[in-house]
Amino acid sequence: MTAPHQSVMCVIPPYMIENILKHGTQIQKKRALKALTMSAQFRGRRQALMNISFPLPRILQPLKHRLIYHAGFKESIRGRLVRKEGEGPSGDPAIDEAYDGAGHTWDLYYDVFGRNSVDNKGMHLVSLVHYGKGYDNAFWDGEKMVYGDGDEDLPEEERIFRRFTIAVDIIGHELTHGVTQYEARLEYHGQSGALNESFSDIFGSLVKQRVLNHTATEADWLIGQGIFTSNVNGKAIRSMKSPGTAYDDPLLGKDPQPGHMADYIKTTSDNGGVHLNSGIPSRAFYICADEIGGYAWEKAGQIWYRALCGRLSAGTDFQEAADIIFRIAGEEYGNGSKEQDAVKKGWEEVGISIRSDKKKSI
């Protein structure tokens, strides 16, 4: 069977870039077009890696290993090694933020979930910074992280995006696409694709929350806070707590994410609305974590991680995910437990009722 079409999973959604193409200045439109064009160049590469059946060698002793490369402001996926594991700060913010962010993500997955890097086999965490000139995005290409510098080279009044290493949750988000690549392999289209994006937002947010030592109540649940310059009327790229409220700007438009199935967006763009409709399952997680209380990675995160690793399949939709996650909460904490009730509340408040009598998944 031919695998479904997939795109490089960039942190800036296509509808935001399309609005810049419509409403931006000539310089801003040129940047937006470049972002779309560069993303398209990597589509085949990522799809090919998603379809490979990787060998299963013995799991190595967990060891954090980060490698940061400098692209030299060229549009090349190769670069010069500028910092490796154990070396001190370079003084270049993009290099050091990529290094630290990869480390914080590794720490969450190992310390909390016992996972040995992205592939659970000790994969080196490779990052490429200073990619191109004026590349307004960041992405995981199937093997490594790639970061653009945003609009830091433009006149102040033309700037929309800051450098893409600046938000640790963006780094956690993109590296989680790698975890999904090795685990559930959620198809990047429609509801399974929206779940793919949602899992990345969830674990990206958990990386940030753990770095800040924030409980579920203290957390802001914003994705990409700080990525916009002061020219943009917006807090972040997305809000898990209140989808549709992250930004409202003349250039970027209003955040279009729905937070309830009643507002689900049926579309052929954005790979069937993967960035748009991800707000629904992301809000379900927020509600669950807030209801349980404490640190979100301790219980809600554990439930969702178990779902991602071994329980979801490539074509899982929202309803199936809700049912599976509900059953996992019962297995972990007991049927009728506070944790399972919180899972149920989370999904029901976004318009998805649990089918608790459904035959148990194997």
Image (spheres, helix red, strand yellow):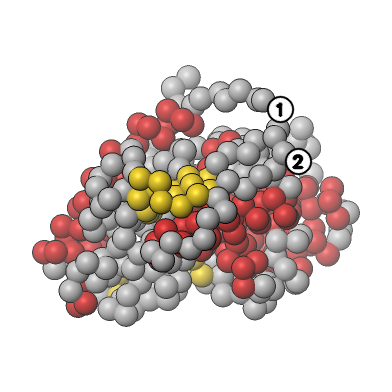
Q: Residue at x 83, y 64 (%)?
A: 338
User: In the picture, residue 39 is in which quadrant?
Assistant: top left
**Amino acid type indicated by mark 1:** Arg
* Residue 287: percent from left, percent from top: 66, 67
Viewer-closest of 96 and 345: 96
Name the mark on residue 309. none
Could one spot residue 104 in this view of the protein? yes
Q: Residue at x 65, y 25 (%)?
A: 56
**Amino acid type indicated by mark 2:** Lys
Q: Is residue 43 left or right of residue 140?
A: left
Viewer-closest of 112 and 198: 112
Q: Is residue 330 left or right of residue 144?
A: right
* Residue 332: percent from left, percent from top: 84, 51
Quickly name the residue at label 2.
358
Quickly name the residue at label 1.
58
Q: Answer yes or no: do the residues labelled 2 and 1 have beta carbons within 8 Å?
A: no
* Residue 17: percent from left, percent from top: 27, 58
Dot placed on the residue nearer the N-terminal end, 2 or 1 = 1
Q: Residue at x 37, y 32 (%)?
A: 45
Could one spot residue 191 in this view of the protein? no
User: In the picture, residue 207 is in which quadrant?
Assistant: bottom right
- 64 is higher (above) or lower (below) than 161: above
- 316 is higher (above) or lower (below) than 98: above
Query: Foreground mark, 2 or 1?
Result: 1
Viewer-closest of 142 and 271: 142
Crowding at mark 1 (Cα within 10 Å: few <14, some 14-19, many 20+): few
Label 1's element?
loop
